[in-house]
Amino acid sequence: MSEQHRLKAVVLDWAGTVMDHGSRAPMGAFVRAFGAFGVKISIADARGPMGMAKWDHIKAVGTAPAVAAAWRAKHGRDFSDADVDAIFKVFEPMNVAAIEDHADFIPGALGAVQAMRARGLKIGSTTGYTRPIMGVLAPIAAKAGYVPDVTVCAGDLPAGRPSPLMMWHAMAAMGVWPAETVVKVDDTPPGIGEGVNAGTWTVGLALTGNIAGYSAQELAKVPEAEKAAIRARAGAEMRAAGADFVIDSIADLMPVLDEIEARLAAGKKPGA
């Protein structure tokens, strides 16, 4: 296969993609952080903007109509950027504290990474987590042998997801181009969006991440009909965000990489 038809790198998200099945670590922290300011939010409220940088995520939750109304009723004023700053200061240490309890690898993730390495692919990563949060998670991953070539965190660049800046930074750090030789894998629409905006191929994950919200043990008990409904809903959300492919889990990724290389050989581009 010619060089221009061969993939060079895969950029992986973290929570819900490689580790933390169901992307559960941030959820309780979001709920508790808003609760500390006298405003009750639901897990559904907290999950809505998942994939964004955490400061942006808090702002999106706080300005959602129902939460904004609750904030106004409690505080007598509209939710502001200063409130985002205050909540973020409470949220970040809560999320850091929750990381170790949700740091298991998603089944098949390490095998997929090994298979990608065996193909000569570079492995990058981007995340909505901040550096302090990744300061806890990355060493846990490293002990199991997962060390991406580059990790780009929320706050490293002027804009987070769905802007392409983190993807472009990761690609530059790995020395890979053009964009169509790179694949972004993520469990959230904003994460898919950053790949689309960067011009890479994109693969959405339906059952291991934020949309499904189940731990691996919980998902194993979900009836097949319900699982199919979750898969359909997640697939619709991912494709609306621009995903080229949607699969259940990173464990299913390798055949998709084969298909992408076949499309490259046929002269096709991401999004076509």
Image: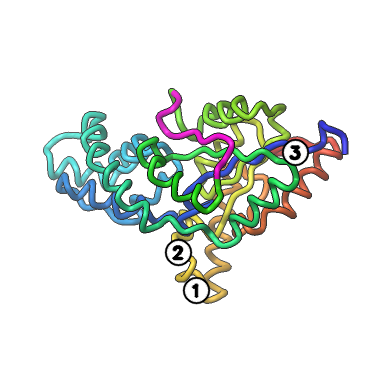
In percent of width and height, residue 217 lies at 47, 70
Residue at screen point 51% across, 36% down: 151
Q: Earlier in the sequence, mark 1 or mark 2?
A: 2
Q: Answer yes or no: do the residues labelled 1 and 2 have beta carbons within 8 Å?
A: yes
Q: Which residue is under mark 2?
A: 214
The secondary structure that most of the magenta stretch takes on is loop
Q: Answer yes or no: do the residues labelled 3 and 1 have beta carbons within 8 Å?
A: no
Q: Report the magenta residues as a range.
A: 147-157
Q: Nearer the viewer, residue 213 or 71?
A: 213
Residue 152 on the magenta span: yes
Residue at screen point 23% across, 47% down: 33
Q: Which residue is under mark 1?
A: 222
Q: Is residue 33 left or right of residue 2?
A: left
Q: Residues within 10 Å of mark 2 (few under 14, many from 20)?
A: many
Dot 2 amino acid type: Tyr
Q: Nearer the viewer, mark 3 or mark 1?
A: 3
Alpha carbon separation for disc pair 1 and 2:
9 Å
Q: Earlier in the sequence, mark 3 or mark 2?
A: 3
Q: Which residue is under mark 3?
A: 7
Secondary structure of the residue carrying numbered label 3: loop
Residue at screen point 49% across, 76% down: 221
Q: How is the image coloured?
A: rainbow
